[in-house]
Amino acid sequence: MGADAIQTNGHDQAKLTGGEEIQRLRCFVKNYEWGKLGPESLVARLQEANTGQRVDSEIPYAEFWMGTHESGPSHVEFGSGHGVSDKCMVTLKSWVLDNPNLLGSKVVDKWGCDLPFLFKVLSVTKALSIQAHPNKALAEKLHREDPLLYRDNNHKPEIALAVTPFQALCGFVTLKELKEVITNVPEITELVGSKAADQIFNVHEHDEDERIKSVVRLIFTQLMSASNNETKQVVSRMKNRLLLETKHRELSEKEKLVLELEKQYTGDIGVISAFFFNYVKLNPGEALYLDANEPHAYISGDCVECMAASDNVVRAGLTPKHRDVQTLCSMLTYKLVTFFTR
């Protein structure tokens, strides 16, 4: 960015005059408990390079935000000196508002004087919640009804690009696999009842999509709505059954994952609900796209995310945070994959 300056909000700010200078962006870091600890975290190493702050080996560094969202705003740093007193900072949002030419006329015409996207780096060592992001209409409704929980009125489609080997749950499994799950995981029937569980065997791949989706919606909603006490007991019995069966057979990858999730979130309904979702393993450079109203949960690894500028998350399992089971179960698309490749 050019060396010419304009006076805005009491600070000298650079404007584009020929690409002579680049302004430093100070980014926001989230220290959620599922983040990797200390220098093991890519987020921590980025923060150290970005701010010069030393990494604390006892602190989880989970998310590195680059954008204008109020939940984690970036700042533009001005000043040529090396000390803190030689510098001043303004929010990236205020700088963009004062310099809309930086976005270009097409962006301003469509999105206004703000960044329409949010860019993140995530370092995950413990599974994130079973969650989905609302579409635009639902986001507006949720924000209007509970602005403290749903911080903005925007949707949040996102793409995650793996930086290291990355694991996630996303989308519902095939109808064939779901029937196998109901057959081989009796604890699901314990929680939802045989009347609901047996309905999965009355639908077939050639049936209308809405008929199949309605059955999956019924079973999944019943499962996620189970009482805490019953869930804890059933998940414990499932864990004990799988551990016993390891003496006689090799557990599937999904079964091994479920046991790992149970260690992280003992007695949580999200542990058993993992059987409903595709277990995805990404190599570095591979990506995963998550549209609105699609269930997912990141499990481990480092990734780069790009999404619409929103912080709206509807959660229902694998989390100590607020759960909105009714909203999540009502908003999901319940699309079943016909095939799935890594």
Image (cartoon, rainbow, N blue to C red):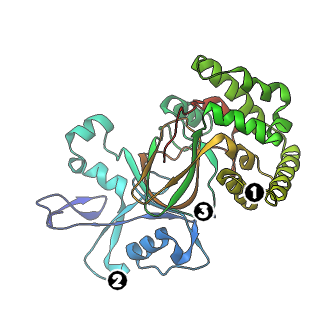
Give the label, 3 or 2, closer to the camera: 3
Please determine whether, in this image, residue 223 is positioned above or below residue 101.
above
Q: Is residue 327 left or right of residue 116?
A: right
Q: State the image coordinates of residue 261 (x, y, percent, origin top left).
A: 70, 56
Mark 2 near mark 1, Cβ–Cβ under 8 Å?
no
The part of the image, by quadrant, that contains residue 9 is: bottom left
Q: Which residue is mark 2?
A: 83
Q: Residue furthest left?
A: 18
Circle 3: is it few (<14), some (14-19), or many (20+) Cα within 10 Å? some
Q: Earlier in the sequence, mark 3 or mark 1?
A: 3
CA distance for labels 3 and 1: 19 Å
Q: Earlier in the sequence, mark 2 or mark 1?
A: 2
Q: Which residue is mark 3?
A: 32
Q: Give the residue type that dot 1 points to.
A: Glu
Q: Which residue is mark 1?
A: 262
Asked whether 248 or 224 is in front, the reply is 248
Q: Residue furthest front?
A: 248
Q: Give the residue type that dot 2 points to.
A: Gly
Residue at 34%, 53% in the rendered image: 94
Please determine whether, in this image, residue 297 is positioned above or below residue 221.
below
Residue at 63%, 57% in the rendered image: 127
Asked whether 325 or 127 is in front, the reply is 127
Mark 3 near mark 2, Cβ–Cβ under 8 Å?
no
Q: Earlier in the sequence, mark 3 or mark 2?
A: 3
Disc 1 element: helix
Q: Give the residue type that dot 3 points to.
A: Tyr
Disc 3 element: loop
Asked whether 329 or 170 is in front, the reply is 170
